[in-house]
C-alpha cells in the first residue's frame, strides 16, 4: 500500500463548559486515535470574543500531520464528530461549548466551500489562536505574514496563561 505525502495542519481547540482543560485533554486523546497529532501548544485561558457574557475559554492549537491528498471536508466531518462526542450542541453562535475544534491551516491549501474556509477566515484576528500557534510554529507564514506580525495589529495582552483581547 503506497504511503501518502504528509503535510502539517493546524487545528484550534477550545472549551468553556464543564472542566475545559479536561475537555481539551479528552478531545486530544480521541484525536490521537484518528490522526497523527504531532505537537500541542500550552493551554491558555482567554476571554470570550463576540458573545462576551460567558465563562472564559481554555484554548490551544495542535499540529496534525495529514495526507496531502486528504479531503478537507472529510477532516471537518471527523472533527465535528469529536465535538459531538464530547457534548457539543450548536444552539447559539459564539455561545458556550464543551468543545470547539476548527481547522486553521492545512499546509498551503486554500479551500473555500459553504462549510469550510482554509485558512480559517478569522484566525489572524484572534490572539487566542495566534499566540498558541506561535508556540508550535513561530516562523509559519499565514497569508504572507508570521503570527507575530498579525498579532502586532491587534489590541491584546498576555499575563501568564491568560489572554485578553479588545473587541475590534
Image (cartoon, rainbow, N blue to C red):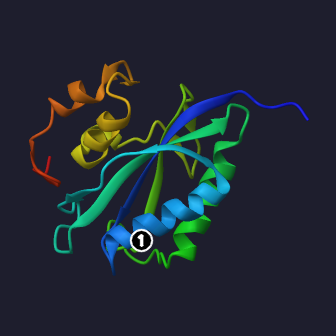
Residue 86: image location, x then y, percent: 51, 75
Neighbourhood count class around disc 1 (C-alpha, 10 Å): few under 14, some 14–19, many 20 upward:
many
Residue at x 32% of width, y 27% of height: 138
Front-lying residue, 14 or 110 = 14
Q: To which residue does mark 1 refer? A: 23
Query: Could you say which quadrant of the image residue 22 lies in?
Result: bottom left
Task: Give the total of numbered labels.
Answer: 1
Secondary structure of residue under mark 1: helix
Front-lying residue, 33 or 14 = 33
Quadrant in which the N terminus is drawn: top right
Decide if residue 137 is in sight here. Answer: yes
Looking at the image, residue 140 sits to the left or right of residue 105; the answer is left
> Can you say whether 67 is above or below 53 in the image?
above
Residue at x 29% of width, y 55% of height: 43
Front-lying residue, 95 or 162 = 162
Decide if residue 142 is in sight here. Answer: no
Residue 21: image location, x then y, percent: 34, 68
Query: Could you say which quadrant of the image residue 137 lies in?
Result: top left
Residue at x 73% of width, y 33% of height: 69
Front-lying residue, 152 or 9 = 9
Query: Could you say which quadrant of the image residue 20 lies in?
Result: bottom left
Residue at x 34% of width, y 44% of height: 122
Amino acid at each position: 500500500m503506497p504511503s501518502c505525502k504528509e503535510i502539517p495542519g493546524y487545528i484550534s481547540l477550545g472549551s468553556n463548559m464543564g472542566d475545559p482543560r479536561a475537555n481539551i485533554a479528552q478531545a486530544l486523546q480521541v484525536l490521537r486515535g484518528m490522526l497523527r497529532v504531532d505537537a500541542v501548544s500550552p493551554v491558555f485561558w482567554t476571554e470570550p470574543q463576540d458573545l462576551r457574557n460567558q465563562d472564559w475559554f481554555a484554548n490551544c492549537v495542535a499540529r496534525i500531520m495529514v495526507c496531502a491528498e486528504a479531503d478537507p471536508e472529510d477532516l471537518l466531518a471527523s472533527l465535528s464528530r469529536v465535538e459531538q462526542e464530547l457534548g457539543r450542541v450548536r444552539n447559539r453562535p459564539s455561545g458556550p461549548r464543551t468543545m470547539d475544534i476548527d481547522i486553521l491551516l492545512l499546509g498551503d491549501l486554500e479551500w473555500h466551500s459553504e462549510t469550510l474556509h482554509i485558512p480559517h477566515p478569522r484566525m489572524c484576528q484572534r490572539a487566542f489562536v495566534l499566540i498558541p500557534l506561535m508556540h508550535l510554529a513561530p516562523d509559519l507564514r499565514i497569508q504572507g505574514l508570521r503570527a507575530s506580525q498579525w498579532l502586532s495589529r491587534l489590541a491584546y495582552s498576555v499575563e501568564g496563561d491568560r489572554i485578553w483581547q479588545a473587541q475590534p
